[in-house]
Amino acid sequence: MASAKEGPRGMFLDGQELTVTGREHRTLLDPATNRPIATVPTGTKEDARAAVESAAKAFGASGWAAPDGQKRVQVLGRIAQALAERWEEFARLETLNQGKPLRESKGDVLYAARTLEYYAGLADKIQGETIPVPGDRLDYTLREPLGVTVHIAPWNYPLQLAVRSVAPALAAGNAVVLKPASWTPLTALSFARLATECGLPPGLLNVVLGSGSEVGEALVTDRRVASVSFTGSPGVGRRIGELAASRVVPVTLELGGKGPNIVFSDADLERAARGVSFGIFLNAGQMCWAGSRLLVQEEVKERFLSRVKELALKLKLGPGLEPGVEMGPLVTREHRAVVEGYVTRGVEEGAVPLVGGPGAALSPGLEAGNFLAPTIFDAVTPGMTIAREEIFGPVLCAMSFRTPEEALALANDSDYGLLAGVWTRDLSVAHRMARGLEAGMVSVNEYPVTFPQTPFGGFKQSGLGFEQGSRALEFYTRQKNVNVNFAPARPPRT
């Protein structure tokens, strides 16, 4: 596994990882200990341009975009199989760099492999259609790859969310430039090397490192870039959208959430309690689709919160590589400080911590890491900061409701609309809630859940467009209409 003793990692261009000397490097830290694990170069605008140049050349010369897609099917299938076989290596590296428990990283790696497998199966099924038109004409459409696509990935699921957009882009015949988050680039670099080993032509997947303000903006504004996929904060997403719009370039933006988990009194309360706990403490709450708002029907609220509290207190915190750990650290000291600020603000605004809270004690031995105790707030009102802003940490905000109509109003009272959860045995209630919720995804009686074949995206400030599913391929292609007039030529006038 990567460590500072192994020397610096590099950027991945033209099919090889290139170490860079004579410039500033970033030291990556293990979130569980804050000890160095590796160093990576700080990229520049020139590096961004070099990555785009590499992709542009490969797109034109590799034959990857051939209409039949046979090569893409074979290569993506091999990458999927190799990643699944080497899950332990990638999972350990993910945990070392990002901090989440090893069991979660294993799931992320296998999900990425399944995503590649899914899009490998679609790579030779990208087709147009024939359209009936008047007269002796044949009218049909073609779907063609865009060319060079840029993918700016987040730090909370470094490999899984990178592959989520890279896989359909490659399946559609494009060449890719991937910019992982500055804190968590290690699995992206290893994945690019793995893809090349599996036969992906050099230059079709380039990994460039650096800040969003320099490298990210250089990528988005490069005239050779034909689309941008971004997962991250709303502020950065709006900036990317503005830059892309100035060049009339399509974007997919996945920008966060403040997911409501709605528990009705008739629900299987034990199942719901476990789902609510999983939905906020998974990955230490560092999820765009975290169920961070808990809405419970009045008559069962006290009993339900008592059970969720029990589950939170039983969570084993610790370094992600240790056996039995259920919740790891936050990704950096800086991010922990931000989440701690929200916890303090919650108390100041009148919320009552049932578990955790400002300065909550941790188990001995965790002081050096970025650990934060799971926190559950009661007595939360809709106008509180913790009820409205995305905290991105293990903080649950509980409120109550009386009727389905009130639950729907509370759930929709948010700037976000990514994933919503509904817990009930009444299918009529479930379907009415699903129809009324302002969210791109609704999950009934489990939370959170998604699959490579199902769309992932949100409404309102949660973003623009959808990842995953067969329709994602459309974003990475352009449609061309062809009209052929085959009527007999008219005799010349005499």
Image: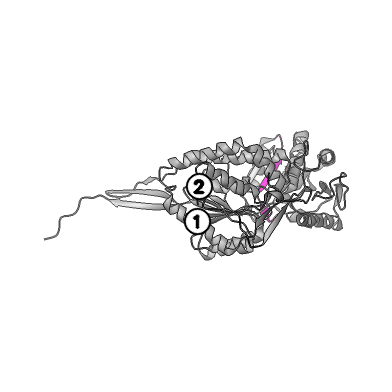
The C terminus, quarter of image? bottom left
- Point out which mark residue 54 bears: 1
Instruction: Tell me if residue 311 comes above or below residue 396 in the rendering.
Output: above
Q: Going by the image, does 145 lie left or right of 466?
A: left
The percent coordinates of residue 28 (x first, y second) are: 71, 53
- Image quadrant containing the N terminus: top right
Q: Main secondary structure of the magenta part?
A: strand
The alpha-carbon separation of the residues under discs 2 and 1 comes to 15 Å
- Residue 99 left/right relative to 131: right
Q: What residue do we see at 81% from left, 49% from top?
A: 372
Give the camera-side residue of 452 and 444.
452
* Helix, strand or loop status at disc 1: helix
In magenta segment, residue 417: yes
Residue 405 on image: x %, y %: 71, 47
Residue at the outermost bottom position: 246
User: Colour scheme in the image?
Assistant: one colour
Magenta-tinted stretch:
415-425
Q: Amino acid at mark 2?
A: Leu
Residue at point 63% right, 40% down? 109
The disc placed on residue 407 is none
Q: Quadrant of residue 333?
A: bottom right
Q: Residues within 10 Å of mark 2 (few under 14, many from 20)?
A: many
- Callout 1, which amino acid? Ser
Which dot marks residue 170?
Answer: 2
Q: In terms of depth relative to the viewer, which is nearer, 406 or 149?
A: 149
Residue 468 in view of the camera? no
Upstream in the sequence, badge 2 or badge 1? 1
Q: Where residue 110 appears, x then y in whole percent?
A: 62, 38
Give SS at disc 2.
helix
Report x, y in % for residue 202: 49, 49
- Label total for image: 2
Q: Are marks 2 and 1 in contact (CB under 8 Å)?
A: no
